[in-house]
Image (cartoon, rainbow, N blue to C red):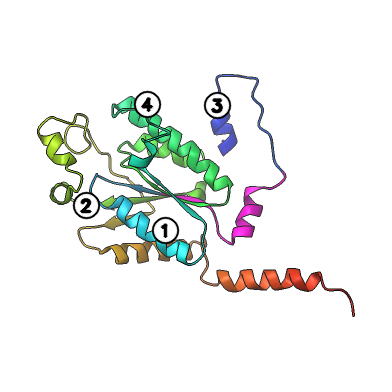
């Protein structure tokens, strides 16, 4: 089942038809000189997902790659502001994020998605609605105690006192990835070291290229040369 078939399988109306467009994902990737994908950061609250994703985006942006960071809290201010933290609401939240991320992929953008996303099946859903190589799962591994010690937002303290219900790691489970593309242990690696590992993976698997700027310059020069009038 391809990505469009996967979406069609859940349609409530039979009168909706997919419209193909002239400018394809591959053409947008060629224009951007990168391979679009979802870089999905999963892990406990306080593990370092957003911190690492933000540092990664800065590094990529500095080198002129097209990116967008989808943060779990930010999304709940708009797209998912009608959802709570029950198991069903968490699943629906990830479904929405998956579909939004899929649109970004089609636009030729590298999406950095930072979500606790505690359930294996929910992350598998996102993986299955895009092409096989377009979902990069990164497990941000960190011991619960260290996450609690960090607790910048004070959420663990509220969860321990019962002020917050359904909090992952306390009274709601977290299902660690079984076979992620990368595991980053933030109890051992610095932010820069974590970003280095991710950048190395992206280069090794041809999502980005160290020669990108040179190739873009060559393409531009080629365009200008082809427009010159004959002598």
The residue indicated by pointer 1 is 57
Instruction: Return the x and y of residue 72 as percentages of the image width and height.
Output: 35, 41
| First in sequence: mark 2 vs mark 3 | 3
Per the image, is 23 magenta? yes
Q: What whole-number distance in Å separates the C-alpha atoms at marks 2 and 3?
A: 37 Å
Specify the label residue 9 is tagged with: 3
Q: Secondary structure at mark 3?
A: loop
**Cα–Cα gap, marks 1 and 2:** 21 Å
Q: SS for tag 2?
A: loop
Residue at (37%, 36%) from the top-left corner? Answer: 77
Q: Name the residue at the left extreme.
A: 161
Residues at badges 2 and 4 in contact (C-beta under 8 Å)? no
Residue 228 in sight here: yes
> Is the residue marked by circle 3 packed among few (<14), some (14-19), or many (20+) residues within 10 Å?
few
Residue 115 vertical position relative to residue 81 in the rendered view, above or below: below
* Between 138 and 48, the one nearer to me in the picture: 48
Q: Quadrant of the N terminus?
A: top right
Q: CA distance from mark 1 to mark 4?
A: 28 Å
Q: Indicate which disc residue 82 carries.
A: 4
Task: Read off the magenta span.
Answer: 22-39
Q: Secondary structure at mark 4?
A: loop
Callout count: 4
Magenta stretch holds residue 202: no
């Amino acid at each position: 089942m391809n990505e469009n078939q996967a979406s069609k399988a859940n349609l409530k109306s039979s009168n909706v038809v997919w419209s193909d467009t002239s400018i394809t994902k591959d053409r947008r990737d060629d224009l951007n000189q990168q391979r679009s994908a979802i870089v999905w950061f999963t892990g406990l609250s306080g593990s370092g997902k957003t911190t690492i994703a933000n540092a990664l985006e800065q590094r990529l942006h500095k080198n002129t790659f097209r990116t967008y960071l989808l943060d779990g809290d930010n999304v709940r201010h708009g797209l998912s502001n009608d959802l709570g933290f029950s198991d069903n609401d968490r699943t629906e939240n990830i479904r929405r994020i998956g579909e939004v991320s899929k649109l970004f992929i089609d636009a030729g953008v590298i999406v950095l998605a930072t979500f606790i996303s505690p359930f294996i099946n929910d992350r598998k859903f996102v993986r299955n609605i895009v092409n096989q190589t377009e979902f990069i799962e990164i497990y941000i591994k960190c011991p619960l105690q260290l996450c609690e010690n960090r607790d910048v937002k004070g959420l663990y303290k509220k969860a321990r006192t019962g002020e917050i219900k359904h909090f992952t790691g306390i009274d709601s489970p977290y299902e660690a990835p079984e076979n992620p593309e990368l595991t980053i242990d933030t109890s051992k690696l610095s932010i820069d070291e974590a970003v280095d590992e991710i950048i190395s993976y992206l280069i090794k698997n041809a999502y980005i290229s160290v020669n990108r700027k040179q190739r873009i310059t060559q393409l531009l020069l080629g365009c200008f040369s082809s427009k010159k009038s004959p002598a």
